[in-house]
Image (tube, rainbow, N blue to C red):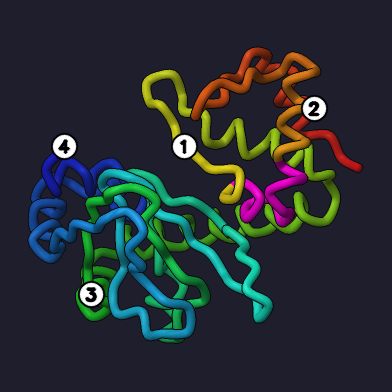
Amino acid sequence: MATKREFLESIPYFTGLDNAELDSISQLFSERKVERGEIIQLEGKPAEALFFVASGAVKIFKISTEGKEQILSIARPGESFNDIAVFDDGPAPASVEAMTPVTLYRISRDELHTILHEHPEVALNTTRVLADRTRQLVSLVEDLSFRHVINRVARVLLENAGDGSTSGTRLTQQEMAAMVGSVREVVARSLKDLEAEGTIRLERHRIRITDREALEEMAEAAT
């Protein structure tokens, strides 16, 4: 795994900083190892630090009063979470759980604020990161409002398939249901339908994309 400085150089918050600045900032980060299934942040609780995923994957999710889970996003290596609560000093708007064994880099709210004052470039980068978060949430609302479950499932498959150099994030049907705002049984039927159309092949503990172009068209189709 890359050193802390090398890692920070690769993430959007610290784009444009020179090696000396990155070396100085990296000293403010601490490393944390997390096991699969461990809750890292609870919704409604204070968020005292910003976290970056160095390895593994975490899910950011909310639970309804009826106990239904909605996964808002999955943070993978190079991505962050707790951004909103750290910057507005409010409670965490969602919970975070490790989906795999995870290595995190952590920086406290106070140290992050110091960096923003000392490095204006980081403050500018922060606005871009938060703007991207807003776009992601708008896209999620669009999917939940205007697309059928099978179209949402197609998008989830594409987003978690990896890029050829990585294996992607392995999801259970229950996790997929929590991402697309449905239930496991409906997701299972959607997967069978996609397989029948020739876009995917269901294998033991794995889903293989066989026609990416067709799956992309399915993911973009509206109701």
Query: Start and end of the magenta stretch?
Result: 176-187
Whether label 1 touches label 4, CB < 8 Å: no
**Which badge, 3 or 2, is on the more N-terminal residue?**
3
Of the numbered discs 3 and 1, the one sitting upstream in the chain is 3
Amino acid type of disc 3? Ser
- Assign the magenta stretch its main secondary structure: helix
**Callout 3 secondary element:** strand
Disc with the residue nearer the chain's start (2 vs 1): 1
Compute the Cα span from label 3 to label 1: 30 Å
- Image coordinates for residue 165, horizontal then vertical, percent: 37, 20
The residue wearing badge 3 is 108
Q: CA distance from mark 4 to mark 2?
A: 39 Å
Q: Nearer the viewer, residue 1 or 65?
A: 65
Asked which secondary structure carries label 2, the reply is helix
Residue 190 is situated, as x and y percent measured from the top left of the image, at: 76, 35
The Cα–Cα distance between marks 2 and 1, rounded to whole angstroms, is 20 Å
**Residue 65: image x %, image y %?**
65, 81
Say what amino acid the circle numbered 4 marks: Met
Amino acid type at mark 1 = Arg
Which mark identifies residue 170?
A: 1
Q: CA distance from mark 1 to mark 4?
A: 21 Å
The C terminus lies in quadrant: top right
156 to 198, vertically: above or below: below
The Cα atoms of the two marked residues, 3 and 2, are separated by: 47 Å
- Determine crowd level at label 3: few under 14, some 14-19, many 20+ residues with C-alpha closer than 10 A: some
Decide if residue 218 is on the left or right side of residue 105. Answer: right
Mark 1 or mark 4, earlier in chain:
4
